[in-house]
Amino acid sequence: MGLDADGAGAHPAAAAVARLAGADLVSGTRLARTVRQAEHAGLTFVSFTDALLPAVAGSPASARLESVTRAAFVSRTTTAIGLVPQVPTTYPEPFHVAAQLASLDIAASGRAGWLAAVTRDAATADAYGRTVVGDVSREARDVVQVVRDLWDSWEDDAVIRDVPTGRYIDRDRVHHVDFVGETFSVKGPLITPRPPQGQLVVLASDGDVRPALGRPGAPEAGGAERLVDVTLVGGSGVGTARGNATAAREHSPLAGVDLEVVLDAGGRTGADRLAVLDASTPAGVRSPWDTRALRYVGDAAGLVALLTELATPGPDGRRPVDGVRLLPAVLDVDLPVLARDVLPALRAARLVAAPRAGATLRESLGLPRPANRYETRVLADAPSA
């Protein structure tokens, strides 16, 4: 169970309705308090939505710090919850993306993930000084692929700190990736050692990252290399969301549902709160509330019932949905209800389990630690086909 912890909430009018000023939205104290509350509630991870351009140009309600910086900041104030910044794949330099995220995983002791997102806005290309990328899904595939290559460019034990010979690293355990994509190439290696998880957990919305065809030497050569660990799907209803999650498992080990929530709180119904939020949405907002996600508006008991239905096994005995990322309309209003009334009921029904302190995000999600694709000693010892 994850939670998006960006700004005042997922609804574009959240800051205005919550009466939060720009200074509040970038406050480290407020951010740390929110993420600690999520950790204490037993959530598995928090994500940090990001965008280069403000939701509304010139509006203090659009104030935001860069996502990796926010995740790195709270890495030292938490011990168990996973930290998943959204980092675009379309215009940032992939080498720097790989180094930033590897550094975050080191700072978080293996609790980092990456929400790999595409950018379809031409104004963002202008802000980067880049030409518009036409095929953002193909570009995302190349970027995720080379970032994964770069994370493996240092073997796990490349840092030897050999005082007698004066060597800090064993150069034979550091590798050039020599990646050549359709629009860029990367020589490598990375300037950062392999992250604690080997590979950070990569999340992406369904359809954003095109699967990679098999490459010579790649772990899944001959087939489609799985670049995404967790695919996030939406749906107009529970049945649609379950079907989308089942389909998404064809190209990722896990599938989760993005779920917008507006809960009854403070003596008002969720429907009343949503009406106020919609009426307060500023004109010209760049990022309207995502209508692609499944949405729930109502009381906590109804949300528990919906989440239970999502988790109910199908005819094959397997749960079609591995998890949910909650997108609360207003964090300060919805998160307390989630922590008080929803998460305890789910734990009592054994549908969720809180991550343990010291566990990596991969361990919390039940994902194995990948072998290093450049680890020649592993390849030499592997049985021949």
Image: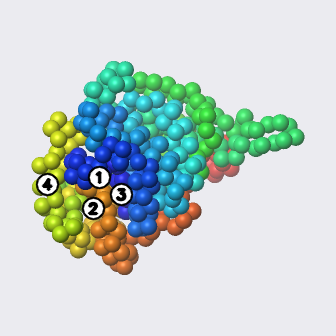
Q: Position of residue 110 (x, y in %)?
A: 55, 54
Q: Position of residue 300 (x, y in %)?
A: 24, 71
- Which residue is at 57% across, 49% downward? 107
Q: Residues within 10 Å of mark 1 (few under 14, many from 20)?
A: many
* CB contact under 8 Å: marks 2 and 1: yes
Name the amino acid, label 2.
Val
Query: What is the C-alpha distance between the residues marked 1 and 4?
Result: 14 Å
Residue linked to disc 4: 276
Q: Is residue 70 shown to the viewer in this render?
A: yes
Name the amino acid, label 4.
Val
Query: What is the C-alpha distance between the residues marked 3 and 2?
Result: 14 Å
Query: What is the C-alpha distance between the residues marked 3 and 1?
Result: 10 Å
Tell me which label, 3 or 1, sits earlier in the chain: 3
* CB contact under 8 Å: marks 3 and 1: no
Quarter location, residue 119:
top left
Q: Which mark is residue 9?
A: 1
Q: Which mark is residue 333?
A: 2
